[in-house]
């Protein structure tokens, strides 16, 4: 039996390796966002600085491992077997949850997931214990409710605190420096850099380092007694150093951003490492105590030894740091989570990843009303002064940056300070919550949310924050269900869940790679937004529009074939899949249309005016085709689901001819796009007219059949009649699209040969 539990501990550490890899993709990337978004340095240099910070922070982390040992539950009242069930359930649930959020590109919190998984698993085991207990155990004897409540409050209060301070500090910083910050650096940058550097040193070395493994009581006492001297000396020295660097021509803001990246990476590792290896280390300590006391009855051996302070071997910390660094450098999912946060805080136009929600629209309207009120009561001179300080047109940003270095500095220094403070207080503040909400608060204060983007950005923030609460609920419920199955299913249930977890991770990674392949067009879109050459923008935009519309036509051809074939064969399953696919395609088309509209702003004004009508005609035709396909699928699905009579064979033969001609039309259009020639557009438009004539003839014959035929077949023939009408409308939309396609590639704009 001891060997089986040893295998469980080994599995816990194997899962911890997965958890480190998956978790760092979501959490550690938070300290990269500001450096990447402001283009403070090359990506490689940012990664090196972050990796050093992560490694040092992980190697020195030890102070918060007690959260996983006795922060949520009272181990003296739990048996070895019960705690092993809890630890295994926590690890399995954590990996599944975090990997799902990474695949969706949503920044969630490993701290929230770990705390609520421990809470949920312990809650269920406590219920099981109390149900079969005769000694009068209560929740207060099993759950450390006071500590758990303080941890949970600390996590969720960090959302409001981070947003508030992010807004206030960025507002003050922008008022001091303005958007044209280079003209205001002469004497201000030294003091600003000194304050930032002092904040980093104070919170990391004085506050954050007190609970780390290298800190002795003597050193901590000396720091406490000389805090004011250390702060004053650091402020004076760093201010002089930053001013000297500025005089020598060094961009001090870039230095601050890299320092902030290092400090936030170090604070992250010190604060969040417990989320990844705290549970496996607690499992190892439990097993060692169990074996040292002779093993025996795992259900009767109580785990009071976990009340002792954690003492993590250095090689575990170093190993965890190495895994985190490698995962940070190689994870593609980390890049996707970075894209979400940078996109929501970007100062320029870009693809909005989220739609519009009712609550966001209400918030924007209320805010606009409040702003109008403030303007009315504010003196004109004050308004003019603030307008000069917050003149966005003077923004200084590097090529391709999402925001400037002033905001990047505030994001990093403030987030690092808040997280290090939480670490020093032994509160596992969520790194994700703090960094994300600081970034959102600073972007709000920085006027990054314009009237054109505010609704989408607020919807995105609400979606992310809602995802955090969803994480808490899913972690609590998921860990509770899994621990119940493990408790009753025994050791083999634990191994079964390990196998299931590994299978889910493999499947998730495959789906993520497939989704990345489908989003390959985003690279071209970003290229259009990042270039200032209007002629090159127009050339790239033509390629982008052609690529997007080709994908849509290919999808439409396959969708029409699948729907009509499923109707003829009474295949309700395929019709259901197509219904889901059509909803997804509608979202894709709306996103593509918005991206193309953003790209139109990058080309010359004269060209945009000339192509505007044809551009929107082409998009509207594609949406009309999508609507026609949806209507065909809707009536076919309803008919087949009700098990009504199938289409008579004589009508199947007529419809096969229509289906064949429509398929040929789609294939010819795809061939024309692939060849890049527009000489065949008139022939294809003529083919559309021929198909419409064929559909019209079939339509008239069907009317005669309805008047003279079997009344029992009326229902299916009316469905067939609607399918013909929608097909004719779709072909009409294709005909209009071909005209728009040709006009967009007219030699006046692209240098291609004119229509014959």
Image (cartoon, grey):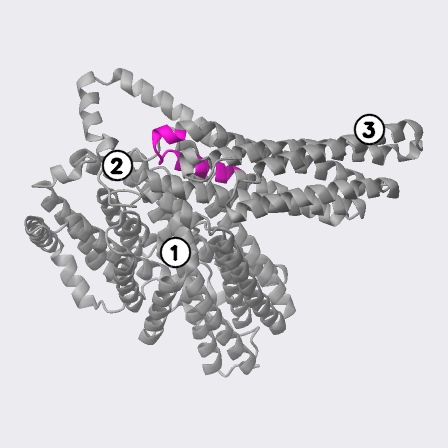
Q: Nearer the viewer, mark 2 or mark 1?
A: 1
C-alpha distance separating marks 2 and 1 = 25 Å
Crowding around mark 3 (Cα neighbors within 10 Å: few <14, some 14 to 19, many 20+) is few
Q: Nearer the viewer, mark 3 or mark 1?
A: 3
Report the front residue among 506 and 275: 506
Element under label 1? loop
Q: Quadrant of residue 491?
A: bottom right
Give the mark nearer the N terminus: 2 vs 3: 2
Q: Nearer the viewer, mark 2 or mark 3?
A: 3
Give the mark nearer the N terminus: 3 vs 1: 1
Element under label 2? helix
Q: Are marks 2 and 3 in contact (CB under 8 Å)?
A: no
Q: Quadrant of residue 32?
A: bottom left
Report the front residue among 735 and 199: 735
Please provide percent x and percent y for residue 398: 24, 45
- The span picked out in magenta is 590-608
Q: Are marks 2 and 1 in contact (CB under 8 Å)?
A: no
Give the mark nearer the N terminus: 2 vs 1: 1
Check disc 3 and report the residue beneath it.
Answer: 700
Crowding around mark 2 (Cα neighbors within 10 Å: few <14, some 14 to 19, many 20+) is some
Please provide percent x and percent y for residue 427: 34, 54
Report the front residue among 324 and 428: 324
Give the residue displayed 16% in from the left and 58% down from the top.
224
Position of 702 with respect to 42 (left or right) is right
Q: Are marks 3 and 1 in contact (CB under 8 Å)?
A: no
C-alpha distance separating marks 2 and 3 = 71 Å
Query: Does the stretch in magenta take in 598?
Result: yes
As drawn, the residue found furthest toward the front would be 756
Q: Tell me, for residue 27, which label it has, or none.
A: 1
Q: Tell me, for residue 168, which label it has, or none.
A: 2
Give the residue displayed 40% in from the left and 44% down from the top.
540
């Amino acid at each position: 039996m001891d060997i089986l539990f040893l295998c469980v501990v080994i599995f816990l550490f194997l899962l911890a390796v997965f958890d480190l890899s998956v978790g760092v993709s979501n959490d550690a990337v938070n300290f990269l966002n500001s450096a990447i978004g402001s283009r403070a340095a090359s990506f490689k240099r940012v990664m090196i600085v972050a990796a050093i910070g992560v490694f040092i922070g992980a190697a020195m982390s030890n102070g918060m491992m007690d959260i996983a040992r006795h922060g949520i539950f009272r181990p003296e009242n739990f048996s070895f077997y019960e705690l092993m069930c809890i630890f295994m359930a926590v690890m399995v649930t954590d990996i599944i949850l975090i990997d799902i959020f990474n695949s969706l590109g949503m920044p969630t919190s490993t701290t929230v997931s770990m705390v609520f998984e421990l809470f949920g698993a312990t809650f269920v085991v406590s219920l099981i214990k109390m149900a079969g207990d005769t000694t009068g155990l209560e929740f207060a004897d099993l759950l450390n409710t006071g500590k758990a409540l303080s941890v949970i409050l600390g996590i969720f209060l960090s959302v409001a605190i981070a947003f508030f301070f992010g807004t206030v500090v960025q507002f003050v910083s922008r008022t001091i420096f303005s958007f044209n910050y280079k003209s205001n650096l002469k004497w201000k940058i030294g003091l600003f850099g000194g304050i930032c550097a002092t904040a980093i040193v104070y919170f990391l070395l004085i506050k954050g380092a007190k609970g780390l493994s290298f800190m002795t009581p003597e050193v901590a006492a000396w720091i406490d007694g000389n805090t004011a001297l250390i702060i004053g000396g650091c402020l004076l020295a760093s201010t002089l150093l930053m001013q000297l660097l500025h005089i020598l021509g060094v961009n001090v803001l870039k230095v601050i951003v890299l320092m902030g990246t290092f400090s936030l990476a170090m604070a992250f590792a010190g604060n969040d490492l417990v989320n990844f290896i705290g549970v496996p280390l607690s499992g190892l300590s439990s097993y060692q105590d169990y074996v040292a006391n002779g093993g025996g009855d795992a259900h009767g051996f109580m785990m009071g030894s976990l009340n002792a302070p954690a003492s993590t071997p250095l090689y575990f910390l170093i190993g965890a740091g190495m895994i985190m660094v490698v995962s940070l450098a190689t994870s593609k999912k980390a890049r996707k989570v970075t894209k979400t946060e940078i996109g929501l805080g970007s100062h320029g136009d870009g693809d909005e990843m989220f739609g519009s929600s009712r609550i966001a629209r209400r918030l924007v309207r209320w805010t606009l009303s409040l702003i109008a009120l403030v303007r009315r009561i504010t003196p004109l001179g004050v308004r003019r002064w603030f307008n000069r300080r917050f003149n966005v047109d003077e923004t200084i940003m590097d090529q391709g940056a999402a925001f400037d270095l002033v905001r990047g500095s505030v994001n990093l220094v403030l987030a690092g300070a808040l997280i290090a403070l939480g670490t020093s207080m032994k509160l596992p503040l969520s790194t994700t919550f703090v960094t994300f909400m600081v970034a959102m608060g600073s972007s709000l204060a920085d006027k990054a949310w314009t009237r054109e983007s505010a609704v989408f950005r607020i919807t995105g923030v609400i979606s992310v924050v809602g995802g955090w609460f969803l994480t808490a609920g899913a972690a609590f419920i998921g860990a509770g269900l899994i621990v119940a199955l493990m408790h009753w299913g025994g050791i083999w249930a634990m191994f079964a869940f390990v196998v299931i977890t590994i299978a889910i991770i493999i499947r998730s990674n495959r789906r993520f790679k497939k989704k990345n392949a489908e989003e390959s067009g985003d690279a071209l879109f970003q290229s259009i937004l990042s270039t200032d050459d209007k002629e090159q923008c127009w050339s790239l935009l033509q390629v982008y529009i052609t690529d997007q519309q080709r994908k849509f036509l290919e999808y439409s051809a396959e969708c029409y074939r699948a729907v009509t074939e499923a109707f003829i064969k009474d295949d309700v399953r395929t019709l259901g899949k197509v219904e889901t696919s059509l909803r997804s395609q509608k979202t894709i088309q709306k996103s593509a249309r918005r991206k193309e509209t953003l790209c139109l702003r990058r080309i010359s004004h004269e060209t945009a005016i000339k192509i505007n009508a044809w551009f929107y005609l082409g998009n509207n035709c594609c949406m009309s085709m999508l609507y026609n396909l949806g209507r065909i699928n809707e009536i076919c699905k309803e008919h087949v689901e009700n098990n009504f009579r199938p289409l008579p064979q004589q009508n199947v033969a007529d419809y096969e001819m229509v289906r064949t001609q429509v398929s040929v039309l789609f294939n010819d259009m795809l061939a024309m796009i692939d060849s890049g020639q527009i000489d065949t557009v008139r022939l294809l438009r003529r083919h559309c007219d021929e198909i419409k004539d064929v559909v019209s003839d079939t339509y008239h014959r069907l009317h005669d059949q309805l008047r003279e035929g079997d009344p029992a077949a009326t229902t299916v023939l009316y469905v067939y009649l609607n399918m013909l009408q929608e097909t004719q409308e779709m072909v009409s939309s294709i005909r209009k699209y071909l005209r728009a396609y040709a006009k967009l590639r007219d030699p006046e704009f692209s240098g291609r040969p004119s229509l014959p």
